[in-house]
Amino acid sequence: MMKLSKGDFVKVLRVPKEIKGMPKETIEIFKKCKGKIFPIENLDNQQGYLLIELDVSKETTGKFKKLTDTIWIEPEYIKKII
């Protein structure tokens, strides 16, 4: 697995299948982020399972502005940009 740190830039490769059943707006944000590059805000390793928080504020404009400026995503859906 790639080494990730806060401040690294990553590209969202795919929309996680785990978002199925989430609110429509959340799914739209993830779809909007696919193929784009974002900085890592935080990493959370709970019980050996890593989640990465991405700053997606550049994508949360218009109807998405009130929702969130970050998303949490699993490492298998991103690629570190060197």
Image (spheres, rainbow, N blue to C red):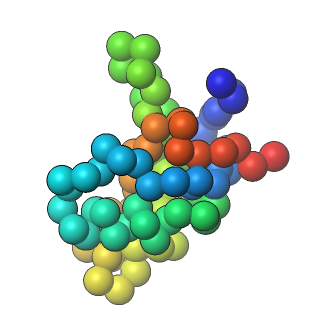
Q: Nearer the viewer, residue 81 or 27?
A: 27
Q: Nearer the viewer, residue 42 or 50?
A: 50
- Please tell me whether residue 44 is drawn above or below residue 40 in the rendered image: above
Q: Nearer the viewer, residue 21 or 9?
A: 21
> Which quadrant does the N terminus fall into?
top right
Residue 49 visible in image? yes
**Residue at left 50%, top 65%?**
33
Q: Is residue 51 left or right of residue 13?
A: left
The picture places residue 2, in percent across and down from the top left corner, at 69, 29
Q: Nearer the viewer, residue 51 or 55?
A: 51
Residue 41 visible in image? no
The picture places residue 15, in percent across and down from the top left corner, at 44, 55
Total numbered circles: 0
**Residue at left 81%, top 46%?**
82
The picture places residue 68, in percent across and down from the top left corner, at 32, 63
Outermost residue to the bottom: 62
**Residue at left 46%, top 38%?**
74
Q: Is residue 71 left or right of residue 35?
A: left
**Residue at left 58%, top 53%?**
13
- Please tell me whether residue 67 is drawn above or below residue 38 in the rendered image: below
The picture places residue 71, in percent across and down from the top left corner, at 39, 53
Outermost residue to the right: 82
